[in-house]
Image: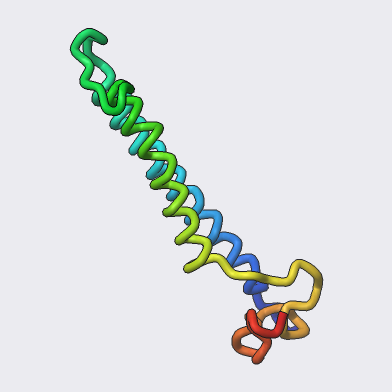
Amino acid sequence: MREKKQDWRYAQANKEALLALGAYGLYFIWWYAFAYGLGDSDPEQYAYVLGLPEWFFYSCIVGYPLITLLLWAMVRLFYRDMPLDGESGDPDGSVPPEETGRGRDAI
C-alpha cells in the first residue's frame, strides 16, 4: 500500500502560523518592556515625548508602526499564495506549485 505524502500546504500554513505567533510575542515583549519598564514610577517623575508619557509613546505610538512594518515584511518574504481547493500541483497534493512549474506567475 502506497503511503500518501503530507500536503505541502500544511507545512507552509504551520510555518506562517509560527511566524505570526513569534511576531505577536515580540510585539508583546516590546509593549510590556516599555509600558511597565518606564511606567512603573511615580507619575510626577515621568518624562514626556510630544506631550505624552514616555512609556506610552514608546510602547503604543512607536511600537504599533514597527510591528506593522515587521508584519508587512513577513508577508512579503515568507507567506505564499496557495490554492485552497483540491488542486495543489500534484494529484496527491505533495508537490508545491514552484516545483511543477505553476508558481505565483501562473495565478
Find residue 29 and report its image quarter.
top left
Query: Looking at the picture, does residue 103 appear above or below residue 52?
Result: below
Quarter of the image for residue 4 reads bottom right
Q: Is residue 63 above or below residue 51?
A: below
Point out the image quarter for the C terminus.
bottom right
Circle count:
0
- Whether residue 103 is situated above or below residue 72 in the rendered picture: below
| Residue occupying the point 57% across, 60% down | 14
- Left or right: 58, with 70 as reference point: left
Q: Position of residue 41 (x, y in %)?
A: 22, 13
In the rendered image, the quadrant that contains the N terminus is bottom right
Rendered residue at 60%/88% (across/down): 99
Q: Residue farthest to the right?
A: 86
Instruction: Tell me where residue 70 appears, x and y as whole percent.
Output: 42, 54
Of all residues, the one furthest to the front in this rendering is 50
The answer to whether 86 appears left or right of 32 in the picture is right
Left or right: 76, with 86 as reference point: left
Q: Position of residue 35 (x, y in %)?
A: 33, 26
* Residue occupying the point 39% across, 47% down: 66
Residue 61: image x %, image y %? 39, 34
* Identity of the residue drawn at 46% across and 44% down: 24
Relative to 84, residue 92 above or below: below
Q: Residue furthest left?
A: 45
Of 19 and 67, nearer the camera is 67
Give whichever of 53, 107 is nearer the camera. Answer: 53
Figure coloring? rainbow
